[in-house]
């Protein structure tokens, strides 16, 4: 992708500081009575020389504004293209939603392409929980009471094993908890458990160790010596979610969220109930269609407003730009798209246009569609290659961040900006040198004028002295 508008603005700002330094007014301390006039000559000469730079800066500001406006349009064009693609995806999946007959026990979510059907979940004998054990004994002081006679213990979680080495300073309950929390197996992999100290009362402290993930496993902590005693209880080694799918398929999972049994469908088991018989029905959900259309309408209106802001008597920096007319053409294709069947146009889905072209959606139209009309709506929306959703390709050709029409313009404007910035810096450098040279010349002229003024004063004084001595006349007796 080419340079962004923010990057251009940063570059222009940096160059502007350099240009300002180059064109900073230079002054000299004059000694003649005409020094202020000479300073005015210097200032005026620089102002005239700066006129081309000012013109270039104005031109570059316009270029940066165009890049910023194109960037905004590019983002909105791609957003609208994404909305059309999402509507096509929704149509392909038939906007299926999952409904549970007992949502307090089981819920489900569709996240792939499925067909309308019904599944049954029964015999939920357990749900996944994390292993969690405590020390078999309590300790008087968590920071000082020794916990391991040999100072070496072995932590096991499932297939992972870690050796815990305690020093004289850490051979206590808190030191053990810290060591467990940072434990790694022989492969350097962290053991996913959490240990903490529980204070049940005065001089009664226990170690609590829990697996970070649910599922039946092995969680033990023992002394490293042969036949070392168990440090933890063995009362809660975790559990899996166990149930029967469609009355004959046993499922055993270490998670309560199960997405690897039916591709595209996730079951969420919320509680155990051996007597449960929960139906999960997959059917088209009109609210998904309404939501997708609502997003599409909102983003269409945003893009329309941005394009209209570049037209008319108050047009923005992209007035007359070809990209505006291409975007407008792509949007017109969307508005005028015609399908076949029960749903033939956007208006059949409750979308209407105002006098200014803005869309509005009546969501009750979609909610009132029959099952066959909903299926026709999916056909109208189509896919990436058919129906309304296929028009996303026209927008992508405009907004693609690498090959799109808008990006091509941005790249061209970036080059123009670089050229203008180079010209501005070159001319500013020339003006700075001109100003320095002229300042030296005027300073020399001022010094010459001051010398002449001094000679004039001496001559005047001599003439006055001669007049006085010869004629007894003093031109300025008070002088």
Image: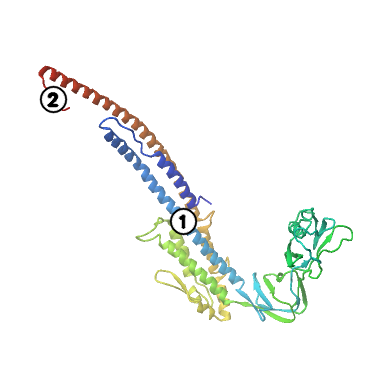
Task: Tell me the residue that label 2 is attached to.
Answer: 475
Mark 1 crowd level (few <14, some 14–19, many ≥20, 10 Å Cα): many
* Horizontal side of residue 43 vs 280, given as left or right: left
Image x and y of residue 167, in percent? 79, 53
* Horizontal side of residue 138 vs 350, given as left or right: right
Work out which residue is located at the far right of the displayed protein and give it.
Answer: 226
Quarter in which the C terminus is drawn: top left
- Separation of disc 2 and disc 1 at Cα? 79 Å
Image x and y of residue 21, in percent? 41, 40
Label 1 SS:
helix
First in sequence, mark 2 or 1: give its number.
1
Label 2 SS:
loop
Q: Nearer the viewer, residue 155 or 350?
A: 155
Q: Quadrant of residue 243?
A: bottom right
Task: Tell me the residue that label 1 is attached to.
Answer: 70
Q: Nearer the viewer, residue 337 or 240?
A: 240
Residue 346, compared with residue 471, is above or below; it is: below
Q: Nearer the viewer, residue 292 or 19?
A: 19
* Horizontal side of residue 212 vs 286, given as left or right: right
Residue shown at 43%/61% (left/top)? 307
Instruction: Tell us which disc is closer to us: 2 or 1.
Output: 2
Mark 2 crowd level (few <14, some 14–19, many ≥20, 10 Å Cα): few
Q: Is residue 436 visible?
A: yes
Q: Quadrant of residue 252?
A: bottom right
User: What numbered label is drawn on residue 333?
Assistant: none
Image x and y of residue 139, in percent? 79, 63
């Amino acid at each position: 992708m080419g340079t962004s508008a923010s990057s251009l603005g940063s570059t222009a700002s940096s160059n502007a500081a350099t240009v300002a330094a180059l064109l900073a007014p230079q002054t000299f301390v004059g000694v003649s009575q005409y020094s202020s006039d000479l300073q005015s000559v210097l200032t005026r000469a620089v102002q005239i020389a700066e006129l081309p730079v000012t013109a270039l800066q104005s031109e570059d500001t316009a270029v940066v504004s165009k890049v910023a406006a194109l960037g905004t349009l590019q983002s909105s064009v791609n957003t609208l293209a994404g909305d059309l693609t999402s509507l096509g995806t929704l149509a392909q999946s038939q906007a299926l939603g999952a409904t549970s007959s007992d949502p307090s026990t089981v819920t489900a979510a569709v996240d792939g392409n499925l067909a309308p059907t019904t599944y049954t979940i029964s015999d939920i004998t357990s749900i996944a929980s994390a292993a969690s054990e405590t020390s078999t004994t309590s300790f008087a002081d968590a920071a000082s009471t020794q916990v391991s006679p040999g100072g070496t213990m072995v932590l096991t979680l499932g297939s992972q094993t870690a050796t815990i080495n305690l020093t004289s300073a850490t051979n206590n309950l808190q030191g053990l908890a810290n060591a467990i929390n940072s434990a790694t197996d022989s492969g350097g992999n962290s053991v996913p458990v959490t240990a903490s100290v529980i204070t049940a009362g005065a001089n009664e402290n226990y170690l609590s160790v829990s697996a970070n993930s649910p599922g039946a496993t092995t969680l033990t902590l023992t002394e490293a010596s042969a036949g070392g005693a168990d440090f933890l209880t063995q009362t809660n080694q975790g559990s899996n979610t166990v149930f029967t799918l469609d009355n004959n398929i046993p499922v055993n999972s270490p998670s309560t969220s199960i997405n690897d049994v039916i591709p595209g469908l996730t079951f969420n088991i919320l509680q155990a109930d051996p007597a449960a018989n929960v139906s999960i029905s997959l059917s088209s959900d009109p609210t998904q269609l309404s939501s997708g259309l609502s997003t599409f309408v909102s983003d269409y209106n945003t893009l329309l407003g941005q394009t209209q802001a570049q037209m008319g008597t108050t047009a923005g920096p992209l007035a007359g730009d070809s990209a505006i007319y291409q975007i407008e053409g792509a949007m017109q294709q969307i508005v005028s798209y015609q399908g076949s069947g029960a749903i033939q146009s956007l208006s059949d889905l409750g979308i209407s246009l105002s006098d200014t072209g803005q869309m509005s959606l009546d969501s009750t139209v979609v909610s009132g569609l029959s099952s066959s009309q909903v299926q026709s709506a999916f056909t109208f929306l189509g896919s990436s290659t058919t129906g309304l959703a296929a028009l996303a390709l026209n927008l992508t050709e405009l907004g693609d961040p690498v090959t799109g029409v808008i990006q091509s313009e941005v790249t061209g404007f970036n080059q123009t900006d670089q050229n203008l910035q180079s010209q501005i810096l070159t001319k500013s450098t020339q003006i700075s040198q001109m100003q320095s040279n002229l300042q030296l010349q005027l300073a020399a002229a001022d010094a010459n004028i001051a010398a002449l003024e001094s000679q004039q004063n001496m001559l005047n004084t001599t003439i006055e002295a001669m007049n006085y001595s010869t004629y007894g006349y003093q031109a300025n007796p008070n002088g």
